Image (cartoon, rainbow, N blue to C red):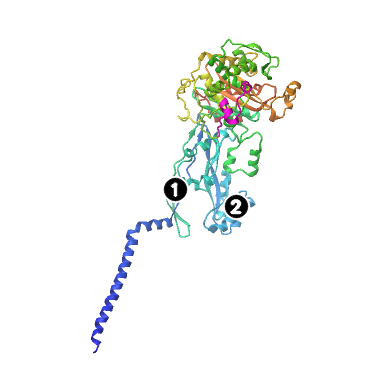
Amino acid sequence: MSREPSKPRLISRRALALGGGKLALIGVLAGRLYYLQVLEAGRYTMLSDKNRISIRILAPPRGHILDRFGVEMATNAPTYRVEVVAEQAGNVSATLDALAKLIPITDSERRRVMREVRRKHKFVPVVVCDKLSWNEMARIELNTFQLPGVSSAQGLTRTYPFGKTASHLVGYVAAVGENDLTGDDPLLELPDFRVGRNGIEKAYDLELRGVAGTSQLEVNAVGRVVRELARKAGTPGHNVVLGVDMALQDAAERACAAQGSASCVVMDAWTGEVLALVSTPSYDPTAFSAGLSSAEWKDLVTDPQRPLSNKSISGIYAPGSTFKPLMAVAGLEDGVISADTEFFCPGTFHLGDTVFHCWKKGGHGHLSVRRAIKESCDVFFYNLANLLGIDRMAAMARRFGLGETLGIEIPGERAGLIPTTAWKKATTGVSWQRGETISCGIGQSYISVTPLQLCTYAARLVTGVEVRPRLVRPHGVMKAGDPAEKAPAAGFTPLALDRDHIDLVLNGMYGVVNEQGGTAYHARIEDPSMLMGGKTGTAQVHHISAAEREHGHLTGISVPWKYRDHALFIAFAPFDNPRYVCSVVVEHGGLIGGEGGAVAAPIARDVLIEAQKRDPARKTPDRPFMAEVAVAGS
């Protein structure tokens, strides 16, 4: 049978199958196109824009640090840099030769530029020099027609108008480290960005830093910038206003610098505002912002006077005889002595086979608490310590802020130590000894405090309340017309001490500086409207052996500096209505066997005179500090 009639039907079926397959493919293609162009349109538009648009972070201006009257302690200054674009310059080496006739270019800078030109795209700018002066930048701008591919750019750099003055307080900024790159802030990704590394700069870094801005740039396939599409400025950082009076800070720092390694703290006892916080020697914070060389860093860390250490909050010292007013308050409050109690001082105090010496070899004779403070009799306070015991002494010391951190806003504060019987047992496994109590009675043995604690102790003593120090002003810059007064120590918790006991102790401190026989009579303020009260202290660094005491070894100026006693002084003024309190510590400022107050007390006197003349707690000074600096420098 013939099969010819079935061929047309076979061809028709194949045509239908082929056509159906084509339609299916066209359907799949159409569906894919719909998916890509309609359903996924937003995503691919975003990816396209991401390739076409480059978003760059703009650093905002860092906030300023100001003193209580608005004087700038840390600010920003314009900085200029010169850049070269290789594809525009053509011969980069020749361009650098021409540029070197206008500004200095070192061989290392030239090698770096040529290295970066070879490594980067030809259209990417390469920094030749930064931190140019205005005159250098102007010379380049005037000669740009002879410098193909060269352009100048402006930025901001952190500056400290007072240099080393207040550097421990203000701190410094430095480059971002790997540990800082948490991904939380895009600003940290910028190559030239700086973060706070010490002082207020570190403590308030986030507030000072501000919020980043953005610039949207259109770029081609190889990353060349075509144009800027949009720009959103960042939010500048907040200013931080301190309670410090920069003029008083400068005066205190000059006085301390004359003695080498020293610290000084000045406070408004009514408010707790720190008016000056000094540690000498200091360092230049601008050098840290720019970047220290290895030689500069080595000089700083090997200096025996420790310029990097903020001694005012982290220096730990035995308080010496500055501890005696506190001892007197403890004895009066606990009832172991009264205003009329007398002890006899023959020059020594015996406890078993141990002999404790008074600084006055022949002794003071019979004396009560006021005269014991005035003349700083060791034997009186040996007897008092023996009656009180270490635990009652420690309890009163803590009420005055000793042996604990006070919460000052900058990093680095140390607590020091006020020992107790339980502390020694837990720390050493050995029981407390009575002889240790005797030494603690004059601020020696295990007791250690910071200058900030000493100043706080003085503030609590004159006010009778738990004053707490603070650096940052909650209400900003003082201005003319601000309220002139505030109730003394308003808002602080009372210490619940008998006012008669406090007045007796303060009266003894009056005698220290204003009556002959007082241990700081030579450092008195003679203006009757500015009288101060105070207490000297000499903290032993080297233990004097019996042989040395007998034969006079290790006395006088022949004593090596590191073996000399520390000289301390706490003070308050004006005496009739105390508001300004001060502590001074001069490391190794006293001679073994000598009176440390001869060194520290004059510093406190000069600082308290300046404080009372300026009266920064009550009014705006008649002249701004910058004008005073200009006059002094002329």
Residue 623: x percent and y percent? 53, 26
Q: Which mark is residue 99?
A: 2
Q: Which mark is residue 214?
A: 1
Residue 243: x percent and y percent? 51, 29
Amino acid at circle 2 = Leu
Query: Does residue 328 appear anywhere in the picture?
Result: yes
Query: Does residue 629 appear anywhere in the picture?
Result: no
Q: Secondary structure at mark 1?
A: strand
Residue interval drawn in magenta:
412-438
The mark nearer the N terminus, 2 or 1, is 2
Q: Foreground: 599 or 465?
A: 465
User: In the rendered structure, does residue 594 fall within the stretch colored magenta?
Assistant: no
Q: Which mark is residue 199?
A: none
- Tell whether 416 sits left or right of 47: right
Q: Secondary structure at mark 2?
A: helix
Residue 1: x percent and y percent? 23, 89
Q: Nearer the viewer, mark 2 or mark 1?
A: 1
Q: Real-space Cα distance between discs 2 and 1? A: 32 Å
Disc 2 vs disc 1: Cβ atoms closer than 8 Å? no
